[in-house]
Image (cartoon, helix red, strand yellow):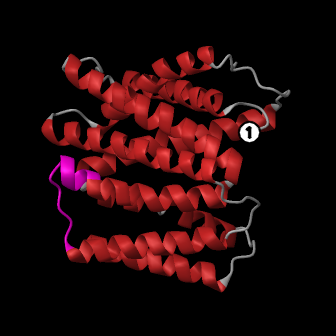
Amino acid sequence: MSSFWSPASLALIKSLVSVALFGIWFWLAGKPIFQQEPETIVYLMVSGIIGIAVGDTALFIALYRMGERQTLLVAETAAPVFILFGAFIFLAEQVTLVQLFGVALVIFGVDWVIGLRGGRGHFDAIGVFWALLAAICQCFGVLVSRLFLVETNISAEETAFWRIAGACMALPLWLFFRKQSLRPALPVNLRIVSRLLVGILLGTFFGILFLQMSIALLPAALAQTLIATSILFAVIFAALRRESVTVHQWVGVVIAIAGIAVISMA
């Protein structure tokens, strides 16, 4: 999609469509979304501005500069580590040595799979900076979400909605000051639009919904670590499509699954 929209434009499109989907979700479920304290809503929207608006934009910039493999290696390795220390410092959450071992296994397995994937790209200092910034922003968003999910009666769906709503408020300002537009740089067809909508539905709408649900149930570091295993499904789907999957990639999948098992049983 990088040929059609800038990083911030793509992040705003994702956020606008997702917040509309959540609005439909609440309408169909008959659930009010304005019953929380204003302070809670403000904090969650700020976490969305930083975690989604800034974080997603930074991630897209890194993707454009370094490619998928290098960006994911940096971001997916750094995010669980940042959240592990952030949750310990700010939320007083502690992870056992056994769980730490499981986290290490998952990170190693995921990195092993990502490192063996094909694709063009190279590491560069600016790209690594943006990938690390994306991980830090994601860390902030997860920690704020965890705090309010534990301390208040807000639901995971509501936190997801308000975080994305915050991103929708901040990203237009970025586009205005950067003089960027939501208009695609190239003509789009039905295939491009369909791919974009499927990506938003699965990656943004359900992605942040399931993330918030996991944050509500698990310590922040464990939730983020398990979310990072999403890349493993790419290997499984590739195998189902009878694409080439190496033995080494399967080894990485097995290592990561072993880490998940250790975390689950600890």
Asked if residue 5 shows in the view, the reply is yes
Label 1 Cα neighbours within 10 Å, binned few <14 / some 14-19 / many ≥20: few
Residue 122: image location, x then y, percent: 71, 60
Which residue is more in the foreground, 177 or 247? 177
Instruction: Name which residue lies at 64% across and 35% down.
Output: 197
Residue closest to the far front: 125
Task: Provide the residue span drawn in magenta.
Answer: 86-96
Describe residue 151's horizontal placement relative to residue 195 as left or right: left
Instruction: Name which residue lies at 51% across and 59% down.
Output: 230
Asked if residue 228 shows in the view, the reply is no
Q: Tell me the element at label 1.
A: loop
Which residue is more in the foreground, 238 or 150? 150
Q: Quadrant of residue 38?
A: top left
Q: Measured along the vertical axis of the image, is residue 115 above or below residue 76?
A: below
Q: Is residue 95 magenta?
A: yes
Which residue has dot 1 on it?
A: 2
Residue 187: image location, x then y, percent: 85, 27
Instruction: Name which residue lies at 80% across and 32% down.
Output: 190
Tally of marks: 1
Q: Measured along the vertical axis of the image, is residue 79 above or below residue 29?
A: below
Kind of residue indicated by mark 1: Ser
Q: Is residue 116 magenta?
A: no
Which residue is more in the foreground, 163 or 238? 163
Q: Measured along the vertical axis of the image, is residue 76 above or below residue 164?
A: below
* Quarter of the image with the N terminus in it: top right
Residue 79: image location, x then y, percent: 42, 55
* Quarter of the image with the C terminus in it: bottom left
Instruction: Name which residue lies at 66% across and 59% down.
Output: 123
Residue 82: image location, x then y, percent: 36, 55
